Structures are given as structure tokens and as C-alpha cells.
Image: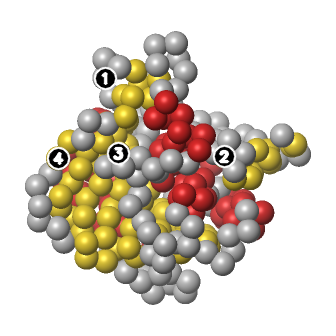
Amino acid sequence: MTENSDVTEGSLLNGAIAYRQLRTGFRTGLEPVLLAATIPARAGEHVLEAGTGPGAGLLCLAHRVPGIQGTGVEKSSEIATLARQNIRINHLEDHLSIIAQDILAFAPEIPGAPPNCDHVFANPPWHEEASSPSPLPLRDQAKRRHAGLVSQWVQALGRMVRPRGSISLILPASLISEAMSSLREAKAGEITLYPLWPKAGRRAKIIIIRGIKAARGPDRVEPGLILHQEDGSFTPQAHDILRFGKALDF
């Protein structure tokens, strides 16, 4: 990995995707890679990621599903620039684009915004408002939520997805109730919960939740994914997703 004073140059999916991000501040974790593995997109469909950061989720999804069209919405102009660089160095300019905009101020009529996306997804800020602030403003902005923020993000995403399109989020398990009620307010149904277990027999801290716009089928809870074995290494299924970009099929 080569580095300069502000940006590190690394990779995702075992080197399949070149990836730049800021040296300090918010650093990409497992969440966008895991969430991207669940998006049920097909070639030719349009996806939108809110709070895309340097673009990890979009890049991983485009690697798994060649031929998709994708838009990332990112509030920080500095990080949006990094996302555009990552798209360019991975030769995906014909398929992916970035809009520097706050998702809560975003509207489909903004130039470059796709109408009626097939799938929308996000890893929204979810640290408690009262928790200790980070001394790094971009990290604090990426992580801290205020009351009602999850609902606001879901409503914004719901306005951009077509009927029968999917709305997917990765969140702490403590926000299940808020996320489900927000999805229903956005006219989504057939809500699926997919727990991410840190190890077998441990309580799930993170969940993936998906709703289908204008759907009326039953909700369900899937068996979920165990991330780590007892020795701390990734389980074979988690390894295949995080290292080789395999799908996490609901």
C-alpha cells in the first residue's frame, strides 16, 4: 500500500478493487461490503447509495453485478471527490457517478439524479447524539445521528425507489423498531431482518433490514450470517463475501 499525507491507497475484495480513503477520520469498515452483498440488483438496473463515503458499497456491488448503473450521494464534497477518484481508477465511469449532496436535501429533480431507482441502500449514521464526539469532524458527521435521523433517511430513500424496488439498510439491532416503522411510513412492506452474529451463540449487534416498496407480503427473519469463528477468523461464508465479493442471498 502506498500513502501520501492525506490519503491511503489500498484495496477491497482481496485486491479486486483499488480503494482510496482519508488517512484520518471515518475509515471504511465491514458494513458497506456486507450490505452491498445483499442488494438484489441485476445488470441494467439502477441503484442508489446514500452516504456513499469513498464508494465502497457501490464499488463492491458493481464488481459483483457487472452492468448495473449506480449513483452515490455523499454530503462531504471532499469525500465525494475521493469516491469519484475510486470510480475512475477502477474504470467504472460509464456505470457509476457521485453527487455531492446531503441525502436529506436530495430530490429526484436534482440534475444527475436517477428517477425511480430499482434499489436504494444506506449505512446511515447511528451513534447516539449524546455519545462522546470524535475530534475529527468528518468521522463525527459520518457516525452521529440525531433523533429521527433514521426515519428521515428512509423517507428520502423511499421517494427515490420504484414500486417493488428494495430499500436496504445496515444498522445496530437496537434500531430495529425505528427502522421497521420508518419503512412502513415509506410505504414499504415484506420487511426482512437479517442478523449479523459476531460469533455463534453471541447476540447480534448489527442487522441488515430490507423493505420492498408497495409490497404487502409477510415480514420475516432470516437465519443470518455468523461473521467469526471461535479463533476470531472469518467464517467461510463471511470470508467469501468480504474477500471475493460473493452474494449474501436473502
Q: CA distance from mark 4 to mark 3?
A: 12 Å
Please name the residue shown 41% across and 83% down the image: 115
Query: Where does the image place residue 248, in percent across and percent down from the top left?
Result: 41, 47
Q: CA distance from mark 3 to mark 2?
A: 20 Å
Location of the N terminus by quadrant is: top right
Please name the residue shown 17% across and 61% down the image: 189
Q: Secondary structure at mark 1?
A: loop
Please name the residue shown 41% across and 25% down the image: 198
Q: Is residue 187 left or right of residue 42?
A: left
Q: CA distance from mark 1 to mark 4?
A: 18 Å
Query: Where does the image place residue 119, in percent across and percent down from the top left?
Result: 39, 68
Q: Give, as a three-letter code, the residue at label 1.
A: Arg
Q: Is residue 105 above or below residue 206?
A: below
**Toward which corner of the image does residue 155 lie, by quadrant?**
bottom left
Please name the residue that numbered disc 1 is placed on.
Answer: 203
Q: Nearer the viewer, mark 1 or mark 2?
A: 2
Please name the residue shown 19% across and 71% down the image: 214
Please name the residue that numbered disc 4 is placed on.
Answer: 220
Tags 3 and 1 touching, CB below 8 Å: no
| Outermost residue toward the top in this view | 231
Q: Nearer the viewer, mark 1 or mark 4?
A: 4
Q: Earlier in the sequence, mark 3 or mark 2?
A: 2
Q: Earlier in the sequence, mark 1 or mark 4?
A: 1
Q: Earlier in the sequence, mark 4 or mark 3?
A: 3
Q: Is residue 121 above or below residue 141?
A: below
